[in-house]
Amino acid sequence: MTVTKYSANGNDFIIFIAQEKADRSELAKKLCHRQNGVGADGMVVVLPHPEYDFEWEFYNADGSYAAMCGNASRAVAHFAHEKGISKNGKAEFLTGAGVIHATINGLYVVSDMVEPRIIRTDIEEDDEIWWLIDSGVPHLVAVRDNIDTFDLEQARKLREKYNVNVNICKIEGNTMYVRTYERGVEDETLACGTGMVACFIRNHKEGKVPGQVKVHPKSGDELYVSCEEGVYRFGGKVTKTFIAETLI
Ligand SMILES: N[C@@H](CCC[C@H](N)C(=O)O)C(=O)O
């Protein structure tokens, strides 16, 4: 089977086309395995859809299904546009969290996110306040002055307790820095799109940042997150890294 590998600012994905929905959890575990497979944080299956350009299935590296993946939404939009599945610099596709509208401009892709939900703003853990925000998938967000260290044991406990992705972020002017422990990868990833958006939502709601910010995830890449007329969108470059014939 031919698969295409993308990196979205260090969050990497295996993408391929299929004709029918299926439970591909075991395949995702095999292909995402860093040593025995292609290696990726997640796997995207592009499927036909009668109304939208396509529909997708998204799986985390551990085979778990997730409703949405911000970085993969940008990668798959570029993939679909190159394949002619979507046209005119746009892609409109159905995810488990709703319909995503993406704009493709060369390697720079912007995804309009689904309407987020601020679920709780009062979670106190280890003497700090966390917000629980669903930006397509659930995220805990804490804001700190310094994110040079990220206690992954603490992140793992919070991930298990709330079944979420766990983010710490800091603000410097109109720039945000975000680190994310990702559910389903069960480790910190180099970038997490819905995590960056969740961090922006908290900081924007608390009046700490304007309506558009530059964001640097762990990879150090540069992305932008904004809220325009109530629509949260985020953009950055994607990289198609290779095409492979899988034998597993
Ligand atoms: N990396 C993704 C998030 C993928 C899903 C997440 N790991 C979950 O299981 O909730 C992103 O870029 O948003």
Image (cartoon, rainbow, N blue to C red):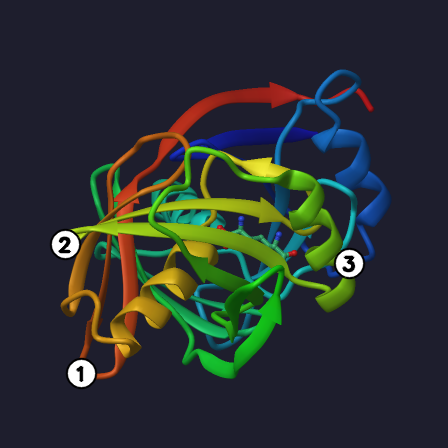
Left or right of 190 on screen, residue 152: right
Quadrant in which the C terminus is drawn: top right
Mark toward the viewer: 1 or 3: 3
Residue type, numbered disc 1: Glu
N-terminal of the two: label 3 or label 2? 3
The residue under label 2 is 174
- Could you give the CA–CA distance between mark 1 and mark 3, rounded to whole angstroms? 35 Å
- Graded by Cα atoms within 10 Å as few (under 14), some (14 to 19) or many (20 or more), the crowding at tag 3 reads few
Left or right of 209 on screen, residue 192: right
Q: Name the residue nearer the viewer: 229 or 179.
A: 179
The residue under label 3 is 160
Secondary structure state at the residue bearing disc 3: helix
Whether residue 202 can be seen here:
yes
Q: Residue at x 48, y 82 (%)?
A: 117
Quadrant in which the N terminus is drawn: top right
- Locate residue 107, reporting x and y percent: 25, 37
Residue type, numbered disc 3: Glu
Q: Residue at x 39, y 61 (%)?
A: 199
Q: Residue at x 67, y 22 (%)?
A: 38
Secondary structure state at the residue bearing disc 1: loop
Q: Name the residue nearer the viewer: 52 or 101.
A: 101
Q: Are marks 3 and 2 in contact (CB under 8 Å)?
A: no
- Could you give the CA–CA distance between mark 2 and mark 1, rounded to whole angstroms? 19 Å
The residue under label 1 is 229
Left or right of 207 on screen, residue 112: right
Secondary structure state at the residue bearing disc 2: loop
Residue 71, compared with residue 207, is above or below; it is above
